[in-house]
Amino acid sequence: MRVSGLFDYTAAFKSAVDQVKDEGRYRVFADLKRVRGQFPKAVRRREDGSEQDVIIWCSNDYLGMGQHPVVLEAMQAELDAVGAGAGGTRNISGTTRSAVDLEAELASWHQKEASLLFTSGYVANEATLTTLQRILPGLIIFSDSLNHASMIAGIRNGGCERHVFLHNDLTHLEELLAAAPADAPKLIAFESVYSMDGDIADLAGTIALAKKYNALTYLDEVHAVGLYGATGAGVAERDGVLDGIDIVECTLGKAIGVMGGYIAADAVIVDAVRSWASGFIFTTSLPPALTAGALASVRHLKTHPELRDAHQERAQTLKDRFAAAGIPVMPSESHIVPVFVGDPVHTKMISDMLLEEFGVYVQPINYPTVPKGTERLRFTPSPNHDDGMMDALVSAMDRLWTHCRIARMPVAA
Ligand SMILES: *Cc1c(COP(=O)(O)O)cnc(C)c1O
């Protein structure tokens, strides 16, 4: 029992949770067991302990590489050969060999001199963007308004002058660049594929502005790496502008199917970040099995463009099938298939019914991830989602759209 009159910690935590609940943002995670070799199938465990077979429709393991035999064999072999953990930070314990090989492979993939691994894409963004501000005093950062939370965290942590430009709006970006002192160091931080709307930035246009105003470019290709370009190096490769990107940041956890993050850039940039970034220096490095698995995955992805073709074909087919059924699929230039619902209650309700009644797992996307009034479902079909799974999904959606009386008109994003 706490003494009355003193600070009530329990009440404070409870009120923090209640606030999230009141805003309709409270999350209950689906308890899923993926089945090796059967992606996107999984077994869901309900709260009462009973089980249900489900199809995962919202994974960021976009190509099913998290289940690929090439990846699993490499991870198992490495585990058997060198054991579990990396044993500490790289400064103290040295570097695992597969991490060195992976960094070389990643650098060459993006046609950069060097790359540097972090424990996640989040950490890569946060640590690098914070550190760049220490290395470049007076740095001004220009940040797209829809940038990921990890970039925002890194930009804010450094405390530098920052300007947010309207999403993918190069006219606005140029206004802001032109208004800044010509001699100040500048950096433009943006993403290639924006994962909630599925739109893609104008890389060449952004690079042209960076050149004109002597700014660095920092590109998050988290939702593009493995998926775009002849060898899968991302949209910069697809658009033939790898050269114009000064620092590229990616994850090993989505299309590559494992875990971790990295940057790739000129050797001197990477060396400076390696030497200055707390988020790199003071944390245990990725376990060897992960780096070996990621290395195998990247090598496979480089030489298997047919996976990328199949991925695009599946996404286009699902968009077409939703549209044909009058389901309001939002315009998307990428593999992301967003379906407009427009209010949080319906979005959550449809998501719950899809899961419970049809074994379809797709997360509701609500505010603050997307603006209020644009709540949606976000589907990410992989090459492993076959026609039968699509038939079942489209028919379930069709029934729910009727049942819940949701607008069928296509909606402009
Ligand atoms: C998921 C994500 C990250 C973080 O990558 P993790 O490896 O999952 O930490 C960074 N940027 C964007 C745009 C993301 O969607």
Image (cartoon, rainbow, N blue to C red):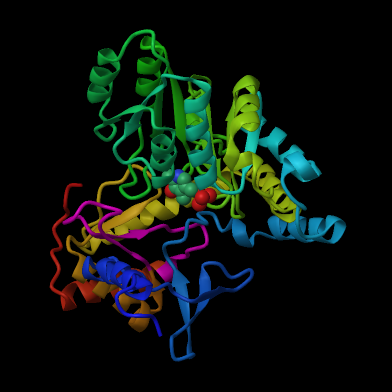
Which residue shows up at 48% across the image and 38% down it?
221
User: Residue 86, image x and y in percent?
Assistant: 76, 52
**Residue occupying the far top of the picture:** 183
Image quadrant assignment for residue 329? bottom left
Magenta residues (range): 362-389
Q: Residue at x 23, y 64 (%)?
A: 325
Q: As drawn, is 301 to the left or to the right of 201? A: right
Q: Residue at x 25, y 14 (%)?
A: 179
Asked where in the image residue 303 lies, by quadrant, the reply is: top right
Depth check: give the residue in front, 242 or 407: 242
Q: Main secondary structure of the magenta part?
A: loop
Is residue 259 visible to the viewer in this orientation of the structure? yes
- Percent of width and height locating residue 159: 39, 32
Q: Which one is in front, 353 or 2?
A: 2
Question: x and y percent of residue 54 in the render?
Answer: 46, 77
Residue 379 magenta: yes
